[in-house]
């Protein structure tokens, strides 16, 4: 019996069966068998959700073998891929075609279908989550139907592009891209209050803006990225002076992104070690944070290929909770979060991240009908983690917050109904497409109350 574990290792499940189909025919056969024997099934993408969205004790279907590019239309900037394709492979292929994803999150390890199914996003007030880039998708339903869904199928399109794996198996996705581009990054460290004051102005003036703040310090970083024709620079990396040392130790090599190698090593060894130290002795966390912020939060400018600037080196293992709140509430909510940490004496060992997302029409999106500030509270295992997450969630809910489905949250159906105006519409569609709960799991029962 195979055990499924998500990226953080928090969710582990023994599954009854593990299936890796390599074609839609094979997916149809698995669904047919499940229908006849009353099995429950769940698609597992790359397992990178912090939530239990991809968990099942029934049969898991993983589309790692359905990872091909099916069509590239350079003139229309469109690409059609099999749904199991990883974003990192898609980025590489798009670059060879002179194309690029318009926006990306911090990593590209996710599968395309997994990323869109939870509303994975990057940052930028005029950029929606990745689901908004979907121009068409193919869905295989519990009844064995193959639905090709486009904007013409209004309701299905609004639901299935961010479907939580609740409506069926997504087998193909057509995405809108744009011509390949470079990004200029400007990263500036500011005292916390000044950063909170400057944030919304920055968001208006730049294409992509995010803020990082490490609790117990008074310094926040604002990162701004804009498209540029300037050539790529070798600019300093995230790890500042420490990164320079590691780069020298690791040495070079053709085709090696030295900076990325160094950052990954620092995250996995130095940063991870400090997190463990703080977990054992939480009183040290403020001092550790101070030290990390001095080394890590360095002003910098650089120009690079879009995906290399959007993406970060893999962070050390940690857990994340994130909610979407109205964009204009960002500075106040950030200040209240800081006050909450101080008032409760919480020892928080990981950054708070503030990102932005355009309004969209996806029924389950945090950005449904309103521009969103995506406020993330992150933490590696340590004694205050649970208290931090629950208190933070209560604060975000005060702003009409809507959870990021791929991250941890505790709210369930009655609370979520208040925050998501189309949750009931989605539930009705789900009952129509999956009347016997073939794709159900504990996560969906909590979200939909059934
Ligand atoms: C280190 C790290 C960094 C991250 N950075 C960001 C970030 O910057 N921005 C952000 O928004 N999120 C981020 N995330 C969250 C991540 O993008 C999402 O949780 C995403 O859903 C993970 O994709 P996956 O392929 O691993 O899907 P999984 O976690 O395996 O599955 C997620 C959901 O998609 C469903 N699903 C997967 N494939 C299919 C399919 N073919 N058909 C139907 N349903 C399917 C599953 O059933 C499940 O409900 C990050 C996660 C990690 C671990």
Image (spheres, rainbow, N blue to C red):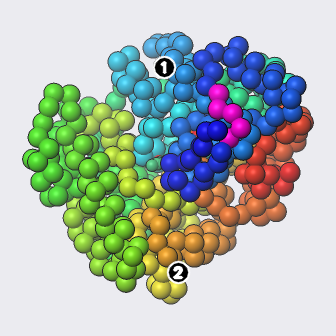
Kindly identify the residue that appears in the image at 14 percent across and 44 percent down: 250
The quarter holding residue 104 reads: top left
Q: Are marks 2 and 1 in contact (CB under 8 Å)?
A: no
- Toward the front, the furthest residue is 1
Of the residues under marks 2 and 1, which one precedes in the sequence? 1
Percent from the top left, x then y, of residue 284?
33, 80
Q: Is residue 374 left or right of residue 203?
A: right
Kindly identify the residue that appears in the image at 15 percent across and 51 percent down: 246
Disc 2 element: helix
Q: Quadrant of the N terminus?
A: top right
Q: Which residue is mark 2?
A: 340
Disc 1 element: loop
Q: Is residue 185 left or right of residue 111?
A: left
Observer-nearest residue: 94 or 33? Answer: 33
Total label count? 2
Q: Which residue is mark 1?
A: 77
Q: Is residue 212 above or below residue 55?
A: below
Percent from the top left, x then y, of residue 34?
81, 28
Residue 5 visible at all: yes
Observer-nearest residue: 287 or 106? Answer: 287
* Residue range highlighted in magenta: 15-19
Q: What's the distance in space between the residues labelled 2 and 1, CA to CA?
A: 46 Å
Percent from the top left, x then y, of residue 28?
75, 19
Kindly identify the residue that appears in the image at 26 percent across and 43 percent down: 260
Q: Is mark 1 within 8 Å of ligand 1?
A: no
- Mark 2 crowd level (few <14, some 14–19, many ≥20, 10 Å Cα): some
Looking at the rendering, the quadrant in which ligand 1 lies is top right
Q: Nearer the viewer, mark 2 or mark 1?
A: 2
The quarter holding residue 165 reads: top right
- Mark 1 crowd level (few <14, some 14–19, many ≥20, 10 Å Cα): some
**Residue 348 circle label:** none
Kindly identify the residue that appears in the image at 68 percent across and 41 percent down: 15
């Amino acid at each position: 019996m195979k055990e499924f574990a998500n990226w953080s290792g928090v969710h582990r499940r023994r599954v009854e069966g593990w299936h890796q189909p390599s074609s839609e025919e094979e997916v149809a056969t698995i669904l047919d068998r499940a229908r006849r024997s009353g099995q429950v099934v769940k698609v597992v993408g790359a397992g990178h959700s912090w939530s239990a969205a991809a968990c099942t004790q029934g049969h898991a279907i993983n589309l790692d073998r359905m990872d091909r590019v099916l069509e590239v239309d350079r003139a229309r900037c469109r690409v059609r891929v099999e749904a199991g394709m990883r974003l990192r492979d898609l980025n590489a292929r798009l670059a060879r075609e002179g194309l690029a994803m318009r926006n990306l999150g911090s990593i590209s390890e996710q599968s395309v279908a997994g990323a869109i199914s939870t509303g994975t996003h990057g940052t930028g007030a005029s950029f929606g989550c990745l689901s908004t880039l979907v121009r068409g998708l193919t869905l295989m339903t519990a009844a064995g139907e193959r639905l090709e869904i486009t904007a013409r199928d209004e309701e299905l399109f609004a639901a299935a592009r961010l479907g939580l794996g609740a409506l069926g198996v997504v087998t193909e996705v057509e995405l809108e891209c744009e011509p390949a581009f470079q990004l200029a990054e400007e990263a500036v460290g500011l005292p916390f209050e000044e950063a909170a004051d400057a944030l919304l102005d920055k968001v208006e003036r730049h294409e992509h803006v995010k803020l990082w703040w490490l609790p117990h310090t008074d310094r926040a970083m604002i990162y701004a990225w804009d498209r540029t024709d300037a050539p790529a620079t070798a600019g300093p990396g995230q790890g500042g002076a420490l990164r320079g040392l590691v780069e020298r130790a690791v040495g070079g090599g053709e085709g090696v992104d030295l900076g990325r190698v160094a950052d990954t090593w620092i995250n996995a060894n130095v940063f991870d070690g400090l997190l463990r130290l703080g977990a054992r002795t939480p009183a040290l966390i403020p001092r550790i944070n101070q030290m990390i912020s001095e080394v890590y939060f360095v002003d910098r400018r650089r120009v690079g290929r879009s995906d290399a600037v959007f993406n970060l080196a893999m962070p050390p293992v940690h857990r994340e909770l994130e909610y979407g709140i109205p964009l204009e509430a960002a500075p106040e909510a950030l200040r209240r979060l800081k006050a909450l940490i101080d008032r409760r004496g919480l020892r928080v060992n990981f950054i708070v991240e503030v990102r932005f997302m355009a309004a969209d029409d996806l029924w389950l999106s945090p950005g449904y009908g309103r521009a969103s500030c995506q406020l993330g509270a992150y933490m590696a295992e340590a004694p205050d983690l649970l208290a931090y997450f629950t208190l933070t969630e209560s604060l975000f809910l005060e702003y009409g917050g809507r959870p990021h489905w791929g991250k941890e949250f505790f709210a369930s159906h009655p609370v979520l109904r208040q925050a998501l105006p189309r949750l009931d519409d989605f539930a009705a569609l789900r009952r129509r497409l999956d009347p016997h709960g073939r794709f159900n799991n504990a996560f969906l029962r909590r979200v939909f109350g059934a």
